[in-house]
Image (cartoon, grey):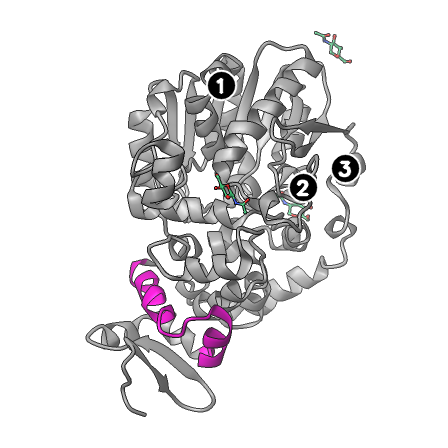
Amino acid sequence: MTAIGFTFMVLLVSCHCQVIIPFGSAVSTLMNNRIVQFASQISADVVTNTVGAFTKVPDAISKIVSSFNTFPLLKNKNLLNYADLLVSEYNANVNNEDVMLSIGDLITKYGYPVERHIVRSEDGYNLQMFRIPSNGSVVFLMHGLEGSADDFVLAGPESGLAYLLANEGYDVWMGNARGNKHSRNHEFLSTSEAEFWNFSWHEIGYYDLPAMIDYVLGISKSATLKYIGHSQGTTTFFVMAAEREEYNDKVSLMVALSPVAYMTHVKSPIVRLLSPGTPIIYDVMKHLGVYEFLPDNSLTKALRLLICGVGPFADILCSNFLFLIFGFDLEQLNVTNLPVVMGHMPAGASVKQFAHYGQGVLSGEFRKFDLGAEGNRIKYGSQTPPRYALNRIRVPVSLFYSEEDWLAHPIDVDRLYNELPNAVDIHKVPYENFNHLDFILAKDFKKLIYKRLRKLLSLF
Ligand SMILES: *[C@@H]1O[C@H](CO)[C@@H](O)[C@H](O)[C@H]1NC(C)=O
Ligand SMILES: *[C@@H]1O[C@H](CO)[C@@H](O)[C@H](O)[C@H]1NC(C)=O
Ligand SMILES: *[C@@H]1O[C@H](CO)[C@@H](O)[C@H](O)[C@H]1NC(C)=O
């Protein structure tokens, strides 16, 4: 094989395996990188046939590899010793009926009342909400990227935030962003039309949250509510509170579980990959238009092979796109409950939601969707998109973050904290490997999150 005019080469190693490595000085460093070693799983054909433009892929991937810390499975050298145990624990619960039950049926099964509501956004999306009604004060829960209302009940009655709040007498409302499995309906657009998916989290914050909040306040006859967001549920809140100032008067406290605004230090390889500076985004966009981000698209198939571990337990985890985006934390993962989680997530999102996050990685700013110089001039009247004015946010905000969060890095959270005019609390979860999904699914959710959260809610 000769080095061809491309910026990389495909190297054949032993047996039937192939490694893709960048060509040039970085080769030996990268050869030592465990991710690249695992890339021996990937066949060159997978990448070329699926991701498209042959020449661009390794460049993008090598960028990510160099800035990316290892997938948790790779970190844990002892995992192979108890992988069998994990697999049997997982398999024992695969037939749990909760895997298939809808959120409404789950809530009913565990003995709580449940209501379903439909709310129309100003721009025509029909959003479904779920409520565990009570006469107590209102708490509004908003899910993260690829999540849904389900996220707050999936941990089960022991650890699910919605149940814990209902036990305290709160009137619990759970929102669903446009495009997720509960909100795939529009006044006149269908999900097969590109226009349906032409939104990022900007529109969720600008249209969906205000519509749902007004509805909730109307039905519950309350003047204010307490808002708890996870991940993108915090991003969308910051968009709303910065862009639609009047909503600052409708929220008495905002709790941010894994606050995501600044993205500079994001570790998630998929989010980094989808920054428009890397060519892959253009391939994805070309194949999918501005459509739904499909969990089993070819890009994620290739990534799965590249970044995931090996072995039966890795196969289980990496079969779910969620863990590829967010990583995971073995100690806090309730393996018995994993089939139930897998049965309900991911819940759907648009490509633009990922792309908008990716833009933040490159720009280092929390700002509106970048349409390119020309598009920006037309839409915003400036060459670059305007920043969200965090200084307009008057709502008291409490931030929960952790060291190993692949999306909300401590440095980025700290910057956010310093720019929020009314941040009332910041709390680093005292648990080394606490990761993004642990903020809703951790085994020790009660001890590590809820104890403090409960106190905060009672104060505002
Ligand atoms: C709320 O409902 C509970 C149980 O139905 C009742 O005991 C309580 O008095 C109610 N509180 C208010 C403020 O209405
Ligand atoms: C998406 O929205 C932008 C304006 O934000 C518009 O310029 C573009 O044509 C839209 N694309 C589709 C496919 O609807
Ligand atoms: C772990 O999952 C199982 C099965 O869903 C559940 O019964 C148990 O309560 C969960 N453990 C915790 C601490 O939430």
* 71 relative position to 7: left or right: right
Mark-to-mark CA distance, 1 and 2: 35 Å
- For the N terminus, the image quarter is bottom left
Residue type for callout 2: Leu
Q: Under 8 Å from ligand 2: the CB of mark 2? A: no
Mark linked to residue 253? 1
Q: Tag 2 or tag 1, which sits nearer the N-term? A: 2
* 332 relative position to 422: left or right: right
Mark-to-mark CA distance, 3 and 1: 27 Å
Mark linked to residue 267? none
Residue under pointer 3:
104
Q: Is residue 114 magenta?
A: no
Q: Quadrant of residue 10?
A: bottom left
Where is residue 429 shown, x and y percent of the image?
Answer: 41, 37
Residue 404 visible in image: no
Q: Quadrant of residue 410?
A: top left
Residue under pointer 2:
189
Where is residue 265 shown, x and y percent of the image?
Answer: 31, 47
Where is residue 27 shown, x and y percent of the image?
Answer: 25, 76
Disc 1 element: strand
Residues in magenta, as a range:
41-67
